[in-house]
Amino acid sequence: MAWLAALILAITGTLHATASTGAMTFEARLALSLQEESSGQVSKETPIQRVVKLLEEMKAQMEKEAETDSEAYDKMVCWCQTNEKAKPKAIEDAEAKIEELMAEVEMRAAQDGESQAKIAQMKKEIAKQKEALATAVSIREKERAAFREDESETVQAVTMLKNAIQVLSKHNSGFLQLSPAVQQSLTAALQWTALKHEEMQKLRIERGALPFDGSANAPTATSLLALAEQSLGQAGGNDLVLRSLRGGKELKQSKVPPRYAARVLASAAAQSASFAQQPAGFQSYAPQSSQIFGILTQMKEDFEANLSESQKAELKAEEDFVQLKAALEKQIDSNMAMLDDMEEEFGANVKALSDAKEDLEATRESRGADVEFLRNL
């Protein structure tokens, strides 16, 4: 039996390196067989037959494992070959995509800065247009208010002069006596209208228009008040109307408010003609009536002409303002729509830029992983 044990040990030593699992199985079975033999159990198989049988079983098991290993090896070779061919292509595609994404990122970043500049400029333009519109509206409102005030004063001056002419005409004809209240109101009304007439002439000169006397040399032109002063000198300085027209230089400035004086004169002008006896000391304005009525009539006509001109100018200014306002509002609406489009495009570009950056980062990571995989393959 010694020679058999030595043979078994030689065989197991030879096969142990290539089939450890099979060798362990063989050893276990051999130990079991020897145990059975030592225990006195008789087997029909001889020891050599049992060894041969064990060797045949181990061979079959090793062949099966070799076949399994071969299949795994073939799969591994196929996987390695496939990846060895596919990964370089994937890396090449990734590099091309990285170049495209970098170009897109650069382009969209430039568009981002350009869009921000355009949006900022458009906002400034809209702000300027809104400011221009607000300024135009403010100026027009002030002009409108000034016109209404001037129109009201001009209408009041025309009314005062018309009533003054009627009152003086009735008084000069002996049909109306001037009460102290009427005299004070007449003085106040004529002083006020005389000053307004001078102001009107100066404003016309400032606007580059000729005064109503037609003189091209407006600052030195003989005014109606100068004529009144000349007539006052000829009248010996006693004429109430001429002194009133002169501006009250020979009279104390009337303290009667113009609106109150206008109501008194209107009431006096509306009185019916009366042939009542005139008071003592009654004096007609016959010596200077032609000059006086000429001055008052000319002043009234000047006011009426100026009123007509200012009303036409106001109408034209209002029409121009309406057109300007409509044009500015249309431009503002158009620019606001453009701004909305710009901001929408800007938002879309920002999103696309963010997506491109994320895609670029992911592509770089994927390429890096593929390169590392090939390095370790």
Image (cartoon, rainbow, N blue to C red):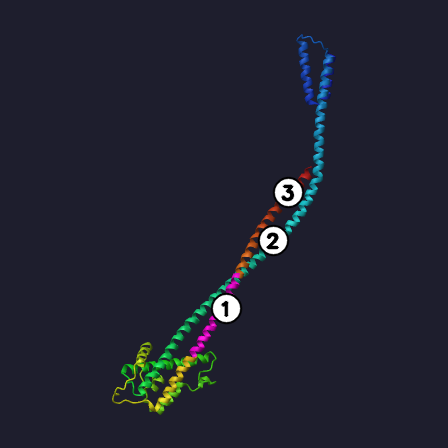
Of labels 3 and 1, the one closer to you: 1
Q: Is residue 247 above or below residue 9?
A: below
- Determine which residue is flagged by label 1: 323
Whether residue 189 sits left or right of residue 19 in the image: it is left
The stretch drawn in magenta includes residue 46: no
Asked whether 237 or 371 is in front, the reply is: 237
Whether residue 294 sits left or right of residue 344 in the image: it is left
Q: Residues within 10 Å of mark 3 (few under 14, many from 20)?
A: some
Q: Residue at x 39, y 88 (%)?
A: 227
Q: Residues within 10 Å of mark 2 (few under 14, many from 20)?
A: many
Asked whether 22 or 278 is in front, the reply is: 278
**Disc 2 on helix, strand or loop?**
helix
Q: How far separated are the C-alphas under marks 3 and 2? A: 23 Å
Of labels 3 and 2, the one closer to you: 2
- Determine which residue is flagged by label 2: 108
Amino acid at the residue labelled 3: Ser
Q: Are marks 3 and 1 in contact (CB under 8 Å)?
A: no
Query: Residue 263's quadrant in the figure?
Result: bottom left
Highlighted magenta segment, given as a residue range: 306-333
Residue 333 in the image: x percent, y percent? Answer: 52, 61
Q: Are marks 2 and 1 in contact (CB under 8 Å)?
A: no
Residue 377 in the image: x percent, y percent? Answer: 69, 37
Residue 84 in the image: x percent, y percent? Answer: 71, 38
